[in-house]
């Protein structure tokens, strides 16, 4: 081998080595920072009246955040993304639903997504150093994220609680009145494709603490069609069996991302209230991602909740007023008791603010003439009421 060739090979090896080092040490954090951005960074200038109104809310709850996917120490205040435990406590959030994402096909979009395309979560998992089984198993990715949250709770000295039962929730609400500087998490799954086609895996996830499941995400799966999939079909026979088993276990059914046919299928069968964890509404933002008036009315008749998001694609606006207007639309259509917050924090969105900016939402709701009691319902009271009825008793 001549000297020139040796130098080329050595140089190539150095470049490969540096790329690998970059991938394992910096790439996931840079992706997190870029994809989970905010339009306004703290400190937030919140008026004393708004701050007072926000602090008076007994129970602030958010139905959707994808925080567990990202490389953060959740017990430390971060400068990236939207959510961590210190920020939740600073924002007086009583309950954050942590959803677990396991697959994201290349080129996914709200109109037509092919679930067979290259999965973007795979390199993210690999370069974060997740256990080897998670490289290829969607179930293992979900279980790893569940363990991640439970490990954070165990290390938090009681600052973060994980809620699994009504008894847990009742105890937590009572304790929080004495010790307000705490927060709680509830585990959700974004897409039943993580079951890998086996209903027995539902019991595995239930044992790991999962209490809410979105049957589909951005692509069609074996259980149901997605609003963004290629076929956009309804519930399959396996999906119907899944729904029955979820209700038997007292796992909340999440309609977010489901096709219209699948939503109709779920609501025709459901005997318990459902949620839409994060969405917009066509009445203020017409697109394939959002709920029609007819769907909202059916969800309300079911006793369910519509969690309105904080990102532009859902509400057709870059500021929090667009979210408030969508909430007003749902409240006027079916009643304020069916409205909730479903931010989609850390879900690769650009939010108006991180979780500490939630008082701005209260300010926007006030400007739309919502009463104090109604704001308390929207900001968490409705979620608390629903969970008190639907979580497993013990």
Image: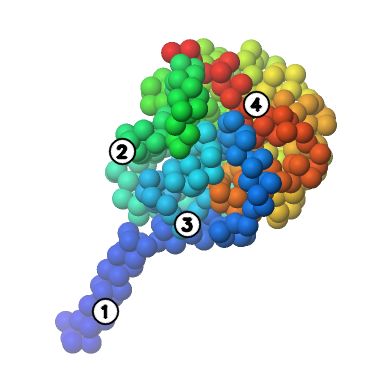
Q: CA distance from mark 3 to mark 2?
A: 21 Å
Whether 196 is drawn above or below 359: the answer is above
Q: CA distance from mark 4 to mark 1?
A: 61 Å
Residue 11's disc number: 1
Residue drawn at 52 percent across, 34 percent down? 94
Residue to which mark 3 is pinned: 80
Residue 199: horizontal and vertical position, in percent? Answer: 45, 21
Q: Residues within 10 Å of mark 4 (few under 14, many from 20)?
A: many
Question: Which numbered disc, 4 or 3, marks the residue that appears first in the sequence?
Answer: 3
Q: Is residue 144 visible?
A: no
Point out residue 258 in the picture as x, y percentages from the top left corner. Answer: 64, 33
Residue at mark 4 to residue at mark 3: CA–CA distance? 30 Å
Q: Secondary structure at mark 2?
A: helix
> Mark 2 highlights which residue?
155
Mark 1 and mark 2 lie on one chain; the one further toward the N terminus is: 1
Is 191 rendered above or below residue 115?
A: above
Q: Is residue 240 visible?
A: yes
Residue 144 percent coordinates (x, y) = 36, 37
Q: Nearer the viewer, mark 4 or mark 3?
A: 4
Q: Which residue is mark 4?
A: 382
């Amino acid at each position: 081998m001549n000297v020139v060739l040796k130098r080329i090979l050595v140089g190539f090896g150095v470049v490969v080595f540096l790329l690998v080092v970059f991938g394992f040490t910096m790439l996931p954090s840079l992706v997190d920072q870029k994809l989970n951005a905010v339009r306004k960074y703290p400190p937030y200038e919140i008026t004393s009246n708004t701050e007072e109104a926000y602090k008076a809310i007994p129970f602030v709850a958010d139905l959707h955040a994808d925080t567990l996917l990202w490389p953060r120490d959740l017990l430390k205040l971060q400068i990236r993304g939207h959510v961590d435990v210190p920020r939740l406590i600073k924002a007086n959030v009583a309950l954050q639903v942590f959803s677990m994402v396991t697959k994201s096909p290349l080129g996914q979009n709200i109109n037509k997504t092919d679930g067979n395309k290259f999965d973007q979560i795979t390199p993210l998992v690999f370069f974060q150093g997740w256990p080897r089984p998670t490289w290829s198993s969607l179930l293992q990715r979900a279980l790893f994220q569940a363990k991640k949250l439970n490990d954070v709770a165990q290390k938090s000295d009681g600052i973060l609680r994980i809620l699994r039962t009504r008894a847990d929730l009742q105890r937590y609400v009572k304790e929080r009145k004495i010790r307000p500087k705490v927060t709680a998490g509830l585990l959700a799954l974004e897409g039943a494709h993580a079951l890998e086609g086996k209903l027995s895996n539902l019991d595995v996830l239930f044992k790991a603490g999962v209490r809410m499941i979105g049957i589909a995400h951005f692509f069609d799966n074996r259980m149901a069609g997605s609003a963004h999939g290629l076929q956009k079909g309804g519930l399959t026979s396996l999906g119907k069996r899944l729904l029955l088993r979820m209700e038997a276990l007292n796992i909340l059914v999440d309609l977010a991302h489901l096709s219209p046919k699948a939503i109709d299928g779920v609501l025709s069968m459901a005997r318990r209230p459902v949620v839409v964890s994060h969405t917009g509404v066509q009445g203020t933002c017409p697109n394939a991602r959002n709920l029609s008036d007819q769907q909202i009315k059916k969800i309300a008749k079911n006793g369910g909740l519509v969690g309105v998001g904080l990102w532009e694609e859902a509400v057709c606006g870059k500021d929090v007023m667009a979210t408030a207007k969508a909430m007003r639309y749902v409240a006027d259509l079916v009643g304020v008791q069916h409205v909730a917050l479903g931010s989609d924090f850390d879900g690769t969105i650009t939010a108006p603010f991180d979780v500490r900016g939630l008082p701005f939402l209260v300010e926007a709701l006030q400007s739309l003439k919502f009463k104090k009691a109604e704001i308390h319902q929207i900001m968490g009271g409705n979620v608390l009421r629903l969970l008190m009825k639907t979580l497993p008793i013990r």
